[in-house]
Image (spheres, coloured by chain):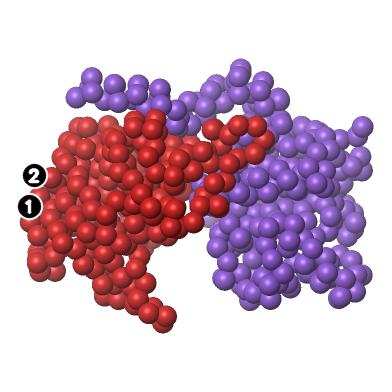
Chain colours: A red, B purple
Amino acid sequence: MPLLEVKNLTVEFQTASGPFRAVDGVSLKVDEGEVLAIVGESGSGKSVSMLAAMGLLPWTAKVTADVLTFNGRDMQAMSDSDRRKIIGKDIAMIFQEPIASLNPCFTVGFQIEEVLRVHTDLGRKARRDRAIELFQSVGIPTPEERLGHFPHQMSGGQCQRVMIATALACNPKLLIADEPTTALDVTIQKQILDLLMKLQAEYGMGLIIITHDMGVVAETADRVIVQYKGRQIESADVLSLFENPKSVYTKALLSALPENAVGGRLPTITEKLTDAEIFAGALR
Amino acid sequence: MTPVLEARNLKRDYHIPGGLFKPAKTVHAVKGVSFNVEEGKTLAIVGESGCGKSTVARMVTMIDPITEGEMLIDGRKVDIASEPLTSEMRSKVQIVFQNPYGSLNPRKKIGDILTEPLVINTKIPAGERRDRAMAILKKVGLEEKHYGRYPHMFSGGQRQRVAIARALMLNPRLLVLDEPVSALDLSVQAQVLNLLADLQDEFHLTYVFISHDLSVVRHIADDVMVMYFGEAVEYGSRDQVFEDPQHAYTKTLFAATPRVDVDAIRARIERRKRAA
């Protein structure tokens, strides 16, 4: 049984000029201990589809899906309070901007202990011990002292570590990382990715990494889904995607990498590709 | 031939005034860097956040005065701390910022954004200003119809084109590009990099290209300078730096850069299988 199963997920937003379809017929499966990367440019619906699966979109969004199950339980039929028991505990999420996703008014210690207070029945002392242990596992030096710090006192990389520690607080079965390293330097990016992969192997979690960076995909993923304008273009394991991309869009995307440039100019095939050509091979 | 930009032992300190309980502090943001950029060449400055690369950009663009050292632009010594900046010098160096969503005034039309540098620095009449803006718009791959539109009506890549167009309005010799493509998608990034290469060929522009993305640097740069905590730890031609990095930090930087070739992926999957 897959950990998360989504079939034919569609998300529509009501706008002044009629409904806008941000996600169109997306299907995916994640097993325990598997790393799935969802790649796409901005506006490809990669974040929205995950937010929809977690039920975090505002009421203006219309979410429909044939199947939307987590661990065998139907997420659509579930009441809001039941869903809140799963989200943050069994499914955790890390967002792109580490500094913006922490509350500036509270210490990081308060914020990580809050998750434990809501989702577990640990006492005050036990929560603090667990927070220290989590900070140690994500490599934050002097955790006892750091617990009393506010987000603005920490660097971006340290804040992202706090976010990861918070997400891992209740030993989630599935971790969704939405552009976890986009705001960080390459050296810090490497540290965070290594940390994520190490923890993923340790806890045996399912991991979904949402990114637009082919480098991150190459360094982390087992399987890859390529999205464009809300639709899935290609789904393959990581090696065959890089070795032998099937769709024209993936080929164009890979050839636009500066590493693959031949001569002085970068091929910009995506400029010339029409939507019809890109969608010709789309998965449905 | 005199280089377009010559910097000798540039230093920049920021003084942070103390408060009631806090002593005053001096931050040495840049601790003496030297470099030359010849006409039509690209110098890339690489480093992590806080290493002083943007401070160098601010000094070169004559936004921040130099604390110590010398800077020569087109063989002429520049020191904005002691003498006021002339509009002639101002038009020699222009800058393109990282985030095109923040660097364009949302309340102004594209036409006004483009003509503003001319209004401030020259006495060119309105009709000609408009003609020049139209010409530049086409040069950067936009159309005349975009002249009357507002920034929010454009995508990120198009906005960055507008920002580049604005920088070119004064016919600069030197363009400082502060992470111009790091906020853009991959395919859009390729388009903007190509545009920059084309403009460099056409106008013999000299670039100071600031970035933390080594794959982009390798693609665009002639010379590379690696900065670490305000110091230049490595400086040389692109091939020299990439083939044979000397400093430990440069090596760390290269090791941290994700590799997208098939062999690297295969090796990683092997490692993962063995660990499991």
Quarter of the picture containing the C terminus of chain A is bottom left
**Secondary structure under badge 1?**
loop
Chain of the residue under label 1: A
**Secondary structure under badge 2?**
loop
Q: Would you say residue A148 is visible in this rendering?
A: no
Residue that mark 2 sits on: A1
Q: Position of residue A235 (x, y in %)?
A: 30, 43
Image: B63 above or below A216 = below
Quarter of the picture containing the N terminus of chain A is top left
Residue that mark 1 sits on: A72
Q: How many marks?
A: 2
Q: Where is residue A118 in the image (x, y as percent from the top left)?
A: 15, 59
Towards the viewer: A238 or A172: A238
Chain of the residue under label 2: A
Q: Do the residues labelled 2 and 1 touch (CB within 8 Å)?
A: yes
Report, in whole angstroms, how far the alpha carbon at label 2 lies from the one at label 1. Answer: 7 Å
Image: B257 above or below B179 = above
Amino acid type, mark 2: Met
Q: Residue at x 19, y 47 (%)?
A: A29
Marks 2 and 1: same chain?
yes
